[in-house]
Image: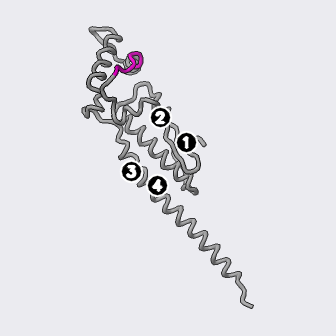
Amino acid sequence: MSVKITRRVGRPTTPEAILTLWAVEVAEGMKEAQIAIGAVASGASLSAYEVLVKRNDVEVLTADYVSFLIEGRGPGGFPPPEEIVRWLQEKGIVPEDMTLNQLAFLIGRKIAERGTDIYEGTAPGIPLDQIVETAFDKIEREAEFLLAVQANEVLKESLNKLRSFKVF
């Protein structure tokens, strides 16, 4: 089952709905954090968030590079230069004393040698652990409500059975 990320109306009434609510809260929190840290160029990554729920399994799908917005990209090989050029263009960055490709090379070299600023700890990333905990806190109330409703239904059913009990 695929679910578009939108604000919900009403209370969830099934365990799957609670899982979906949790995943939507995580995705929304990630999007808000991404905007807050200024990690939005074209906006494509914001529209790429998707929630998938299958029975007791839930996934929050994102654009591939969102993982780099969480922990950063460590040193190693050069990132794809065409991706850096595209990012520079989407950000509207126009270098003054060099070409776009030259600037992309310098950025790629820095990343290859030292990693991204998020990796180095000099820029904030998406605080995923905090977002997940906040989402758990929010759905805990919903789960408690659902359990209370279900317990109430069982109690009513039991009372109705007792009322219909006849002594011979």
The residue singled out by tag 3 in the image is: 133
> What amino acid type is highlighted by mark number 4?
Ile
**Amino acid of disc 1:** Leu
Q: 23 or 64: nearer the eye?
A: 64
Could you give the CA–CA distance between mark 1 and mark 2, rounded to whole angstroms? 11 Å
Horizontal and vertical percent for residue 114?
26, 25
Give the alpha-carbon distance from disc 2 to disc 3, as whole Å: 19 Å
Q: Which residue is mark 1?
A: 52
Considering only order in the chain, which callout, 3 or 2, is on the residue closer to the N terminus?
2
- Marks 4 and 1, how far apart in space? 17 Å
Pointer 4 or 3: first along the chain: 3
Along the line of sight, which residue is nearer the eye, 161 or 95?
Answer: 161
Counting from the top left corner in percent of width and height, residue 9 is at 55, 50
Tag of residue 139: 4
**Eyeballing the image, is 166 above or below 3?**
below
Q: Which residues are magenta?
A: 77-83
Q: Residue at x 46, y 33 (%)?
A: 46
Label 2 or label 4, whichever comes before in sequence order: 2
